[in-house]
Image (tube, rainbow, N blue to C red):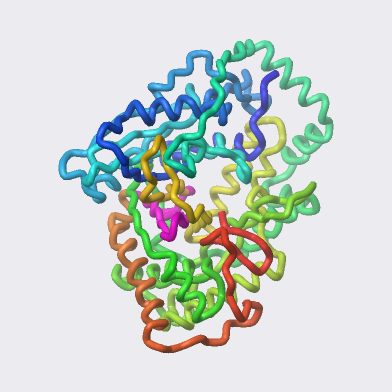
Amino acid sequence: MTERLSPTDAAFLFLEDSSTPLHVGGVVVLQPGRPDFQYSDLFDLISSRLSLVPRFRQRVRFVPGRIARPVWVDDENFDLTYHVRRSALPAPGTDEQLTELVGRLISRPLDRTRPLWEIYVIEGLQGGRIALVNKTHHAMVDRIGAVDLAAAILDISPSPRALPEQVWLPTPAPSDADLVVDAIADLTSRPSDILDVVKLAALDVRSAVAGLSSGLSGAWELARRTVRPAPRSPLNVPVSGQRRFAAVSVDLAAVKKIRKVHSGTVNDVILTALTGALRSWLLARGEPVTAGTTVRAMLPVSIREEGPGVDPVVSYLVDLPVSEPNPVMRLHQVSFAMAAHTESGQGVGADALMGLGRFAPPTLHALGARVGSQLSRRVYNLLVTNVPGPQIPLYAAGALVVAMYPVASLAPGQALALSVTSYNGTVYFGLTADRDAMPDVDEFGAHIREAVEELLGTVNSGHGRRPGPPGTSPTGKNGAVGVGTDERLGKETV
């Protein structure tokens, strides 16, 4: 029996086009501990861990006539050498050369006739380091709790954990006739979906959202916010399919020191540093920054609570105060804004608009996806994701992980996406930018470092603790999971 793609995963496929490849990933830098470490060590490790992620040997199969969502089927011609690719940098193998290569690699769409992932093993970095660049389509990752292959190959000790050898025998792919029969059976077993199809066919998008607001309250909330569109910004322009990538790292202890003195959360400090970087970047480009100028960020947040009807991801829309010149006041304003959102419970469900795509005909999947893409230009200027990582050393095939940069995808009309993670005492920023719209993404990365140093300067200058804004903890204690935890409601950014 085949497994049908979820509504959200199917929507990602329908939303994707040549200008918006929808894969996410990361850049992991390894420091081998032995001189004979080679590509085959990593290839064999990846091969041994595929049993942990069965989806990575499956491909998408579309239903004839597109009368239902696509299904996952085993790839009977699965070829690991296609997905694990070897490359090298020319001497001297600098970090700048690596980020330039990453930008080119993430620009290439994944082959939809194969499992939707790739890992590049990049050799030749200075100091004998090796980089792993992974790309995984949004449709492959089932949101919260999913295991990505890039995570499955990591261990907490130099000795890779042993797994029992498992022989993989692909299930024969269904015929076109089988897919059609299964699709019809799914439709007839859910008559309410057919009724919804009729409703959506008779109504335009706005009335459809309004009519379904009781069941899609998150979608209605997000649609309501379009009455107050996001500020005009050079971050929102038509984009190409070509990307640039920049990598930045800062000391997590410094971030925690800032939080300890000025209260708030570690996540608030990260957002404030990004706000300061945005301010410097806008001014450097000659953009007007006047009183009240803001940049609206969408912040997906994972909710730890589980249970029926609980959306595992909500998204907060936060107006970042880029007009504020004082870094401490900037931090307090960001903390207050985050506290107001988390305590109000008015987060927008991340899957809300994608819920419009749950109805059977793929034309309606495409409609829901397009609504989401059009709203992204109106509702927010910038996507910021933040995942707390482990604060212990990790290894891949015995090689120490010395850096870990996340890679996000760009939504239509978005020139920049920011991803943040913490690992082993360091905060890593991954900046994905459109190649033409943001050629100065490296300068933006430098502004992030400057913003953190500016905040740290307020601590070292003896300003002392300042009272936090209403709704913040007087101690500002941070959870053990690291960057991205919101202590107020037991939530963490994703």
The quadrant the C terminus occupies is bottom right
Q: Along the line of sight, which residue is nearer the eye, 24 or 216?
A: 24
Q: Residue 381, can we see it?
A: yes
Task: Give the residue displayed 33% in from the left and 34% down from the top.
Answer: 121
Q: Nearer the viewer, residue 437 or 197?
A: 437
| Quarter residue 448 falls in | bottom left
Instruction: Tell me which corner region of the image, top left, top right, bottom left or bottom right, holds residue 273.
Output: bottom left
Main secondary-structure element of the magenta-colored stretch: strand
User: In the rendered image, is residue 298 in sight?
Assistant: no
Tell whether position 427 is magenta. yes
Seen as rendered, the residue at the extreme bottom is 463
Identity of the residue drawn at 63% across and 63% down: 225
Magenta residues (range): 411-434
Residue 30 image-quadrant placement: top left
Q: Is residue 281 left or right of residue 183?
A: left
The location of residue 157, given as percent across then percent down, is 46, 42
Image height of 91 relative to 224, above or below? above
